[in-house]
Amino acid sequence: MEEIISTNFIEEIINEDLREGKHTEIITRFPPEPNGYLHIGHAKSLCINFGIKQKYQGKCNLRFDDTNPSKEDVEYVESIKKDIKWLGFNWDLELYASDYFGRMYECAVGLIKKGLAYVCDFSAEQIKETRGTLTEPGAESPYRNRSVEENLKLFEDMKNGVFADGEKVLRAKIDMASPNINMRDPIIYRILRATHHRTGDKWLIYPMYDFAHPLEDAFEGITHSICTLEFEDHRPLYDWVKINCGFVPGPRQIEFARLNIQRTIMSKRYLKKLVDEKFVEGWSDPRMPTLSGMRERGYPPEAIREFCNRIGVAKANSEVETSMLEYCVRENLNQSATRVMVVKNPIKLTITNFEGTEYENIENNQNIESAGVHKLSFSKNLLIDAEDFAIVPPPKYKRLVPDGLVRLRGGYIIKHTGHTVDDEGYVTEVFAELIPNSRSGQENAGMKVKGVIHWVNAEDAVECTLNDYDYLLTEGSGDFSLRMNKDSHKVIKAYAENYLKDAKPYERFQFVRTGYYSKNNKSGLNFNQIVSLKDSYKG
RNA sequence: UGGGGUAUCGCCAAGCGGUAAGGCACCAGAUUUUGAUUCUGGCAUUCAAAGGUUCAAAUCCUUUUACCCCAGCCA
């Protein structure tokens, strides 16, 4: 096989394994527990695992790690599948840890027969008490030296429902004095009477992660089992199970640093709390950092993948700035989104020297020649955004001012001639006259103007709602208390070009900000710059 | 205090003994009918710190420091 250039440490490991002839095909897996929706952190793992599949022309399985029925639900398996597809990945095999319960049981029996596992009668409290501490060794259980026959019988009884939940557990017999707490006779099977979303009430005992995971990987012939850093301490146990159940050399566990994004909640537990306590409308609320939430916002899946490529893979804990993600979204939308004019806070603009109706050709996307144009009607009754006219302009203001000139994007240059204000001093209507022959290509088109503003024809503009997604759910500085504002999700009423009327059924527009008007505050995404319809990204 | 990890620009991140890639952010300028895009230029004499080895060290050795993870019958 020809040498593959590696771009991160995981690929380096794989390359070395390949060089040493350990494998002929590389197989990875994405193993979510169906207890919540996928979020941007999972996207990183997805990109790593499916990226390896693609790079080495191997395989990547989707395996639901459903070993704890008390937390899992089919709703989650469906959402997970949908989100992975949306992100653009195709798994080879769709598997469930629960399909292996029988084989896992046999492996446990095998361990007992080898004298490497025993049934322990300790209560949860007793196990905790005898586990020792970080600095002190644990104490051996008095049940540790039961005979193989007795253990076999007891374990079978556990399976057959002879005992109550928590009455007994199966433990691996390793080393209660190990400095690695995971090796202090870890529990590998517990009794749990809960209806499993796939196996129903067939099983009363369920394997623990540390026992189940290496077996799942081994059963499937996974070559590289990629997980996050917190499992580094579990690797000795992973290998212990693998070896003692007879899978040698078997899969190799590799750990990488999970993704953290500045001020973004990335823990399933807290995301679930937000959903359960109705801080949001659900897992797919556009404020959520879930893949489905991002889909609702109009984030293209390609942008998320690009983000994952750019942040890289390493073992150092890090926290990526949100500007990195936003950049990827902007970069993609810049090349794909149809530009549409939208006025979010409308004031009337009356053109005093124009009658009738004309049509302007609006470029769908200036960055793509083939994107074409669409028509926008023009009349004397227009709407512009309140922010685009200022009686007293702030410094460096580039839009309409009293007696000033400004270009209506895609149309004429206009000159301010007057305006009216209400009792509180807010502008209610602006009057202007257009400069004849000032449209693109015409003789007066070259006039110097302050800037270019958005507008819509009041006579046929459509009302729409926009998500003001300034607000991604964020944690308060330094703590995870759920004190974000419930109202932080603004849905703005706005007016858009009539062109959008027939676009597609939609409830809300998503828009992306490409820069704020204020120079020192342009880290966000820009309102009237790029508009993408969320439906265009429905996968 | 036991064990396992990690430290390279504000944020990610290459680098694997031969004299600090790249991206984001930021700054300056040019183009521009989106204050966008695009384009050009600037942004680590220094790699957590201190010693040492070497002609040569971010890379090797020693010591120190900081941060992260582990005591669920969760994953």
Image (cartoon, rainbow, N blue to C red):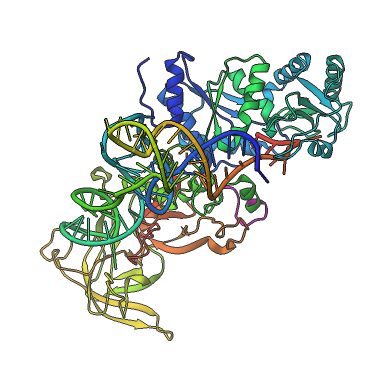
Q: Residue at x 54, y 56 (%)?
A: A474
Point out the stretch of residues depicted in magenta. A275-284
* Residue extending furthest toward the right: A162
Is residue A480 visible in the rendered image? The answer is yes
Q: Residue at x 21, y 68 (%)?
A: A413
Left or right of A82 on screen, residue A234: right
Q: Quadrant of residue A215?
A: top right
Left or right of A159 on screen, residue A255: left
Question: In the rendering, at what x and y percent does residue A531 appear?
Answer: 38, 54
Between residue A18 and residue A104, name the one nearer to us: A18
Between residue B15 and residue A378, name the one nearer to us: B15
Is residue A289 visible in the rendered image? The answer is no
Q: Quadrant of residue A95?
A: top right
Question: In the rendering, at what x and y percent does residue A484 appear?
Answer: 58, 61
Magenta span contains residue A280: yes
In this picture, is B10 found above or below A318? below
Question: In the rendering, at what x and y percent does residue A103 appear?
Answer: 70, 18
The majority secondary structure of the magenta stretch comes to loop
Q: Residue at x 44, y 52 (%)?
A: A322
* Residue extending furthest toward the left: A443
Magenta span contains residue A494: no
